[in-house]
Amino acid sequence: MPQVQLTDQVYNESQRRATEAGFSTVDEYVADVVSHDLHEETQDLDHLFTPERLAHIDKAEAEINAGMFHTAAQADAKLARRRAEWLGQNCDGRQSCV
């Protein structure tokens, strides 16, 4: 069976946590932690893709394909205009607003 090397510090912390969690050995604890970690990576995420969510994604894709989107430069320009408007309305030239 393959073995894993742990530093003394990691082993000691694993031993403490294994005892707290009721494991008889560090090996059992580490195997459990790794098994749960691997399971979490391979979880089925299909439940997140509801018909409504898929429709939203399809609509967004169609809009992007039709050219209905903003470039980063357009977004930056719009934000700069809005910032200038806000500063003009709220700061009256005070340095504390900048």
Image (spheres, rainbow, N blue to C red):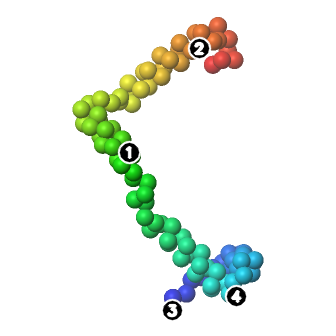
Question: Helix or strand or loop: what does disc 4 sit on?
Answer: loop
Q: Give the residue at mark 4.
A: 24
Q: CA distance from mark 3 to mark 1?
A: 48 Å
Marks 2,4: beta carbons within 8 A: no
Q: Are marks 4 and 1 in contact (CB under 8 Å)?
A: no
Q: Does residue 80 appear in the picture of this structure?
A: yes
Residue 80, image x, y percentages: 48, 20
The secondary element bearing badge 1 is classed as helix
Q: CA distance from mark 2 to mark 4?
A: 64 Å
From what the image shows, is residue 43 above or below residue 49? below
Identify residue type, mark 2: Leu
Give the residue at the far top of this rendering.
92
Amino acid type for the residue under numbered disc 1: Glu
Residue type at mark 4? Ser
Q: Is residue 28 left or right of residue 57?
A: right
Is tag 2's residue or tag 1's residue first in the polypeptide sequence? 1
- Gap between marks 2 and 1 measured at Cα: 39 Å
Query: Within the image, what quadrant is residue 45 found in?
Result: bottom left
In the picture, which quadrant includes the C terminus?
Answer: top right
Task: Give the CA separation, mark 2 to mark 3.
Answer: 67 Å
98 shown above or below 33: above
Q: Which residue is mark 3?
A: 1
Quick one: label 4, few (<14), some, or many (20+) residues within 10 Å? few
Residue on which the image places disc 2: 87
Q: Which residue is mark 1?
A: 52
Q: How many marks?
A: 4
Identified at 64% across, 80% down, the residue is 29
Residue type, mark 3 in image: Met
- Disc nearest the viewer among 2 and 4: 4
Sequence order check, earlier mark of 4 and 1: 4
Q: Residue 31, position in %: x, y?
A: 58, 81
